[in-house]
Amino acid sequence: MNISQSLKLTGVFVKYFSLFLLVPIFSVFFITTDFKIIISKSYLIQILPFLFSSFITFFISLGLNKISNVINTENQELGRKDGFLIATLIWIFAGLLGSLPYIFSSTLVPILYPHIVPIFDNDILINSFFESVSGITTTGASVFSVFPNIDQHSMIIFWRSLSQWLGGIGIILLVLIIFPRISVGIMQIASDQEGTGPQKERMTPRLYQTGLILLTIYLGITLLLYLLLFFIGDLSSYDSIIHSFSTVSSGGFSSYPLSIESLANLKVEMIILIFMFISGISFAIFYFLITANFQRIFENTEFKTYMILNLLLIVGLAFLLNNYYNYSSLSESFRYGAFQAISISTGTGFTSYNFNDWPSHIKLFLIFFLIIGGSSGSTTGGVKMIRLIIVMKRIYQEVRRRVSPNIIYTVKINNKVIDEEVVSGVMSFLFLFIFACILSILAINLIEPEISAFTGASAVLSSISNLGPGFEGINPHSNYSLFSIPSKILLTFLMLLGRLEIFTIVALLLPSFWKKY
């Protein structure tokens, strides 16, 4: 394993990340173009946390580069282990360095300008790290005891959504574009973290070219959503960009404490609903659409399953809600049911209604789709639709094998036979996912005896599935601030575990990973 080169490449990423920390400074132009307001003390004070964070991040990148030059490595080639290490380091550093603006906004800013309320007034380091990782992993869970005032913390609110946009697919695209000459092994691992899951849809022969195509699609969808929210949804420019970042990334951070519910705008809900659904589709589908390769779209098993299951989810939830409300308003049932169905199934986490008020059987209905998530190769979290398909087909084949043991059965996706190694990997992934959930639920209920078991279980499932809001104590009108420091650390780890698709982090925990061979 080449530790030296791994640290050096991580340092390159950190250097680029320091530039992204400066972007929120320019978010003021989405609010006003009045130069007098822009140079006012309240706005200038908000700039300081991002300037300091950027400078510190840049110097850390220099430090990583210097450390990498000191370490001597016999093996000069980058391999699969290095890919796992770099992918993990990038996400951890993004979470740690992304927390700096929260830390400075809670410590430095209130000292210089007491009029501004601090972001966090207790457990600043842990809360800042939690909020940062929640953003960068597109989980959308928050620990704000009081939601930040837009007048005082517009840049912080912008950073929350920007970090989700970067985490949605931007980080891996940055890796693909700035490391174009890395060996195929590490590039493949990097792409796996936000790639196409067990069944890969290669768009182009070169991963670098694929990264540029994905980036173009990602930017295009974001821009289109911004324009629709601004011109048709009648949102302000600032609110439009905030919700565009959070929707396309399947993140769910909003500029309002009650998310989309605060807007009470049907047009906005419908626009965001459509784009949440779009964000749950594999980016390969958009590439095939642009290149007019419609046959690949029609043959795509995951895409068809995604469409059918989400349609059934919308209809089923609308029916259950209409029945719950005694058939008083089908339009209202469809409005809130459809929005929450897509928001939860894609792991976005936007809320237009406090679904915690719904009956228990509806909550269980939502939890099932929460765990599944969207398509592989999309910005969504969860187990991913393709894995569900593979498991169901494997179960079906096993049943058939019991009936006719002499016949050889294979799992096929898109009319192609799936290697047994891939099927075995999917089964292993599901086992690890279930094991991690059970162990974490037991742990968090032991740590938090005063919190209901359902709240703890909901927090674990929402964190590892990168959803955010949950049920009971962490319902859409509440957040994760009720948990203690150990629980927040555990939930932060689960967010990273879910975003890195479990295997990456688990591999690093094995002693054999660090051996020479």
Image (cartoon, rainbow, N blue to C red):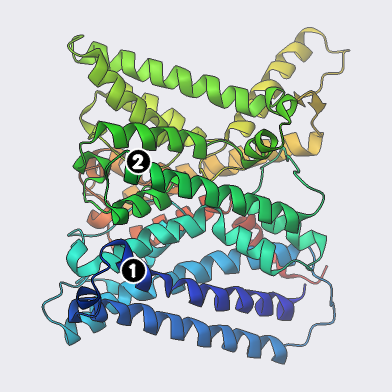
Q: CA distance from mark 2 to mark 1?
A: 22 Å
Q: Is residue 172 above or below residue 473?
A: below
Q: Position of residue 495 (x, y in %)?
A: 46, 54
Residue type pointed to by label 1: Ser
Q: Residues within 10 Å of mark 2 (few under 14, many from 20)?
A: many
* Residue 99 picture location, percent across and down: 39, 71
In the foreground, 397 or 213: 213
Q: Residue at x 67, y 43 (%)?
A: 196
Q: Do the numbered discs 2 and 1 sit on residues whose CB atoms are within 8 Å?
A: no
Q: Residue 56 appears in which quarter of the rendering?
A: bottom left
Residue 35 placement, left or right of 303: left
The foreground one among 475 and 490 is 475
Give the percent coordinates (x, y) of residue 79: 80, 65
Quickly name the residue at label 1.
128
Give SS at disc 1.
helix
Q: Nearer the viewer, residue 322 or 277?
A: 277
Q: State the residue lying farthest toward the left.
A: 115
Total labels: the figure holds 2
* Residue 26 at x, y percent in the picture: 37, 71
Q: Nearer the viewer, residue 159 or 415?
A: 159
Quadrant holding the N terminus: bottom right
Residue of label 2: 458
